[in-house]
Image (cartoon, rainbow, N blue to C red):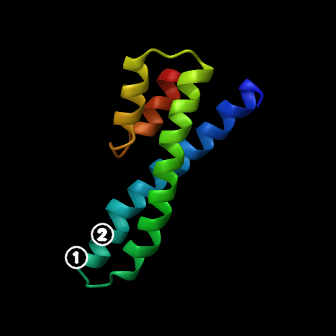
Amino acid sequence: MEKDKAIKIFKIVSTLEAISFLVLLLIAMPLKYIWDIPEMVRIVGMAHGILFVLYVLGAYYMYELLNWNLKQLFTVIICSVLPLGPFYVERKFL
């Protein structure tokens, strides 16, 4: 795959992963625990889980493609569990 295209795809996955995490934390979880409406957590949680796996796989692919060192790879992966972390990764590493 072409380098620019791979980076663009990773940026899209990164953005979607970050948005799904924020929706899960700020909308779905309050609906479940405050108003006892758990359906949103199932839907958004599944989407976020899939995007999280794609993000981690994409991070490893970027590690190989862009010749990151292990510190950069681990920073990118740690950012995936922080609510705004993927946005930081896009600015700092891509």
Horizontal side of 70 relative to 29 (left or right) equals right
Q: Could you tell me the amino acid type at mark 1?
A: Tyr
* Residue at x 53% of width, y 24% of height: 63
Answer above or below: position of 30 versus 90: below
**Dot 1: few (<14), some (14–19), or many (≥20) neighbours within 10 Å?**
few
Residue at mark 1: 33
Residue 94 seen in this snapshot: no
Q: Position of residue 81 (x, y in %)?
A: 34, 44
**Dot 2: few (<14), some (14–19), or many (≥20) neighbours within 10 Å?**
some
Q: Depth check: 36 or 71 in front?
A: 71
Q: Position of residue 72 (x, y in %)?
A: 42, 20
Answer above or below: position of 27 versus 35: above
CB-based contact (under 8 Å), mark 1 and mark 2: yes
Farthest-out residue, bottom: 36
Q: Depth check: 34 or 17 in front?
A: 17
Q: Quadrant of the N terminus?
A: top right
Secondary-structure class at tag 2: helix
* Residue at x 45% of width, y 14% of height: 69
Horizontal side of 22 relative to 13 (left or right) equals left
Horizontal side of 13 relative to 38 (left or right) equals right
* Residue at x 50% of width, y 63% of height: 47
Farthest-out residue, right: 2
Estimate the spatial distance between the alpha carbons at disc 1 and disc 2, rounded to whole Å.
6 Å
* Residue at x 34% of width, y 35% of height: 78
Q: Could you tell me the amino acid type at mark 2?
A: Met
Q: Quadrant of the C terminus?
A: top right
Location of residue 37 (image quadrant) = bottom left
Q: Position of residue 16 (x, y in %)?
A: 54, 51
Residue 29 - label: 2
